[in-house]
Image (cartoon, rainbow, N blue to C red):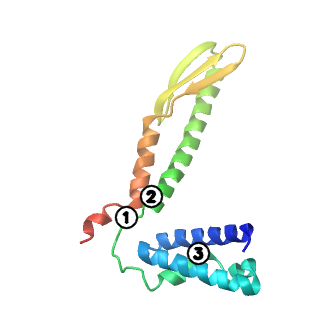
């Protein structure tokens, strides 16, 4: 197997493992499935090649769903930290986009009012401080408000559902 084939196999196994994690498959079982998948693809790659062997497996998401069918619920409820991280990142990106649009509206208001010099204010509903300096050009700077960080953390915690750990036992 050459380097490109190893990279293809590694990426496929990584994606498969990601989907297994989202299907609540225990870590030990995921490790067994990873090793089995690598061994099977390595054997098949000698006969038909790595690309064809991976294509024959289909989507890693579908394969993970099939592999997880017999193991779901065997461990009980657990926190899903991967899902929490994804929710946190998604919330952060969306809120930063909305905050940036709010800052642009603030700057539009400053320029429409014909203000010159330094104008400092806050953008609704985020808070924080934004400063626009109008002179020979336009300079804008500000700090990311704490509300964005707090809402990102809340989204991550809600996505991870750590309260399920309390029900284990």
In terms of secondary structure, where does tag 2 sit? helix
Residue 84, label in figure: 2
Q: Residue furthest left?
A: 169
Q: Give the left or right position of residue 149, taking residue 137 as reference.
A: left
Q: Is residue 103 above or below residue 34?
A: above
Label 3: how many Cα within 10 Å (few below 14, some 14–19, many 20+): some
- The numbered mark, 1 or 3, whose residue comes first in the sequence reads 3
- Identify the image quadrant of residue 164: bottom left
Tell me what residue is drawn at x 39 percent, y 55 percent: 157
Instruction: Name the foreground residue: 23 vs 146.
Output: 23
In terms of secondary structure, where does tag 1 sit? loop
Tell me what residue is drawn at x 60 percent, y 38 percent: 101
- The numbered mark, 2 or 3, whose residue comes first in the sequence reads 3
Q: CA distance from mark 1 to mark 2?
A: 9 Å
Circle 3 residue:
61
Circle 1 residue:
79
Task: Locate residue 14, reporting x and y percent.
Answer: 58, 68
Q: Quadrant of the C terminus?
A: bottom left
Label 1: how many Cα within 10 Å (few below 14, some 14–19, many 20+): some
């Amino acid at each position: 197997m050459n380097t490109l084939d190893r990279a293809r196999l590694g990426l496929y196994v990584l994606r498969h493992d990601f989907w297994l994690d989202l299907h609540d498959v225990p870590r030990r079982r995921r490790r067994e499935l990873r090793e089995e998948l690598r061994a099977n693809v390595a054997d098949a790659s000698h006969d038909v090649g790595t690309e064809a062997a991976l294509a024959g497996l289909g989507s890693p998401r579908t394969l993970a769903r099939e592999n997880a069918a017999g193991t779901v619920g065997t461990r009980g409820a657990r926190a899903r930290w991967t899902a929490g991280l994804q929710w946190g990142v998604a919330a952060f990106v969306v809120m930063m986009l909305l905050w940036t649009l709010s800052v642009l509206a603030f700057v539009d208001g400053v320029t429409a009012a014909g203000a010159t010099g330094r104008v400092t204010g806050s953008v609704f509903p985020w808070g924080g401080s934004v400063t626009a300096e109008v002179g020979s050009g336009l300079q804008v700077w500000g700090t990311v408000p704490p509300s964005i960080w707090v809402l990102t953390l809340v989204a991550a915690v809600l996505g991870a559902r750590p309260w399920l750990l309390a029900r284990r036992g």
